[in-house]
Amino acid sequence: MGKHAVHQRERRERGDGGGVVAVMAALLLAVLPAGLDQTAVAATLPAVVGDLGGLNHLSWVITSYLLAVAAGVAVWDRVGDRYGRKRVFLCCIAVFLAGSALCGAAQSMPQLIGFRALQGIGAGGVVTLALAVAGDAVPPRERGRYQSLIGAAFGAACVAGPVLGGLFADRLTWRWLFYINLPLGAIAFLAVLLALPAIHARTRRRIDYRGAVLPAAAAVCLTAAGAWGGRYGWTSPTVLALVGAAALLGALWWLSALRTAEPALPPRTPARPTVAAGAGVLACAGFAMMGATAYLPLFLQAVQGYSPTASGLHLLPMALAMPAAAVASGRLASRTGRCKPQAVAGTAAVAAALGLLSPLGPQTPIALISVSLLLLGGGLGAAMQAVLTAMRSAAGFPGLGAATAAGAFTRSAGACLGAAVLGAVLAARLAPDLRERAEDVDLPRGLSAARLEADPRALDALPANAQAELLQPYAAAIGTAFLCAVPVALAAVVLALLLKETPLRTAISAPEPDEVLAPAAIAREPLTRVENAAYGAVGGRGPRWMYERLAAAAGFGLSPAACWTITHIAATGSITGADLARMCHRPTTALVPLHEELHRADLLSADSEAAGGVWRLNAGGREAARRLFDAQEGAVRDALAGLSPREHPDLAEVERRVARNTLGDEEDAELAAEGPQLRYA
């Protein structure tokens, strides 16, 4: 039992006050800049295009970041497990800061795109490992509460991003959107360095780098095909070659994953149709979401004349509706046990919102745009949360990691493709219309149609009548882009209708809201996710039920209070009655019935005579505690029966760890005051 005692002490040390506060503060400081940069860039894109040119490359400023995040999200946790999470986390912060500094200094659009990819590599590791480190810093029972803070911080940063981006573009320059990360990141780096204890390497398992690189490369080829389709033609050799390369890379990934024991993105899952349909819905949702995020600020600033700050504020209805609808959708799924209605209704709302945004023009009321964005955000949040829940429920334990990884990657890939394809549509429609109308307008010297296309802010220099004439091509091009997104949203509705209703399990929690707020964070290490779910499986109905079940499995008739007490003493060595009374917030006299039960069962040592004195186990008590731990380990093993020890060599350690961590936990100390009189069927 010495190992249990050591583990219990370590958990108390990690879970107490100041240390956890310092670690969480460091993690939040690191996550906030990564969340801001995911959405803040959207409001600054017109200013970026004005400084660097390259409107036809605008989508790549967003997609390069997202693709880099998606490429690393499946492997960062494993890299941390192998080389030590603190060390890898600090490296990710450093990479993110280097990318931020280079983005701020970029002198051309290709440079900015490349540096955004570097920034995304670091950001993906920061967010993914922050959740893992938060889980390491606290006891298992506290993980959900502390990890939800990471998700909430990331979500808040994403909501505030467009407004802050607009403020920087208005008051300073878009470059400060990246430079501001440097002092924040430096503080986060020092805080992590000082506050976070060294988390040593846990495994020497091989990391499936090919499984991360090949799908990302395929997504790059598809995104490039979408971005260049408007320039070269959708059936041109260039575009067809890119599509072929994407198919080849996808096939190579599939073959590689089939031969890998623990692939980064597993190719096979149970209930394949449900997972495949759900992944398709998420890809379509990402397509619609990034299309709106990337190009609506351009419309608001170039066509309707709003400042970058105001355009960022007008994106708030969508940013606020998404997490609110996600939480509501998750609660509805928990209450009804169904996900399909929310998925269908959410995707239908997305299609309706995009339809409302398609006839945009200079005179479109801002109220209509706000309502459309509210509908769009609500639909996206409800649908994505419901689909994630359905995918994970249908996959079960063996396919849990595969389902979450597939959802994360397809959503990111869909977002990249959406930004690229809609950008190609916009550029293909804008260029000829702008040239044609510019011929009928007396432009000032030095101002051409090409200059107007490259820098929308140049429209401000034109007389009112000429400006009104040349605003029409921008409005028509952006409206056409939204119209092209409508069929994709309708495809999502069809795929949502194909989802098979799978009754939700009552012992395992639905996905957390941060899975919608933070796409970089949801494809965690599969075995880690299985471990977290196992905690719910063995104790999901509460500690009383858990100890009653274990007592029956171990073959003796102890009360839940007695079972908790002997496992707690076995883990800690001994405890005084006064300390136990303080733990359960009762007077020492309330422990007398429990003390008598343990003495009658001959589980306490001879020197444990008084309820207020020292409580120690005798040989019989230690044997009873061992049987309870063994019974709990067996329950965990049964819950994880569908997993293969060959594919998950650490499975036995997970079973032992969950069994140790769930018995004798101080959070359940109030059971001791209930004594032997309560019985639970």
Image: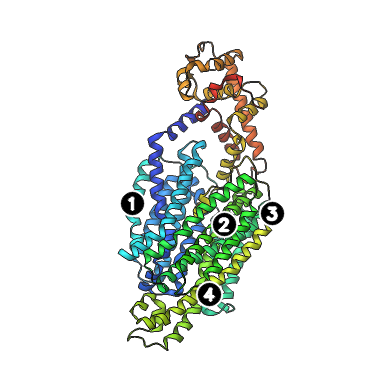
| Above/below status of 632 relative to 25 | above
Mark 4 or mark 2: which comes first in sequence? 2
Q: Which residue is mark 1?
A: 186
Helix, strand or loop at disc 3? loop
Amino acid carrying mark 2 in the image? Gly
| Separation of residues labelled 4 and 3 (CA atoms) | 34 Å
Helix, strand or loop at disc 2? helix
Helix, strand or loop at disc 4? helix
Mark linked to residue 83: none
| Separation of residues labelled 4 and 1 (CA atoms) | 43 Å
Q: Nearer the viewer, mark 4 or mark 2?
A: 4
Mark 4 or mark 1: which comes first in sequence? 1
Mark 3 or mark 2: which comes first in sequence? 2
- Classify 10 Å Cα crowding around label 3: few (below 14), some (14-19), many (20 and above): some
Q: Nearer the viewer, mark 1 or mark 3?
A: 3
Q: Which residue is mark 3?
A: 500
- Classify 10 Å Cα crowding around label 1: few (below 14), some (14-19), many (20 and above): some
Mark 1 or mark 2: which comes first in sequence? 1
Q: Nearer the viewer, mark 4 or mark 1?
A: 4
Q: Which residue is mark 2?
A: 211
**Along the horizontal axis of the image, is 361 left or right of 396?**
left
Amino acid carrying mark 1 in the image? Ala
Q: Position of residue 573 (x, y in %)?
A: 50, 21
Q: Which residue is mark 4?
A: 480
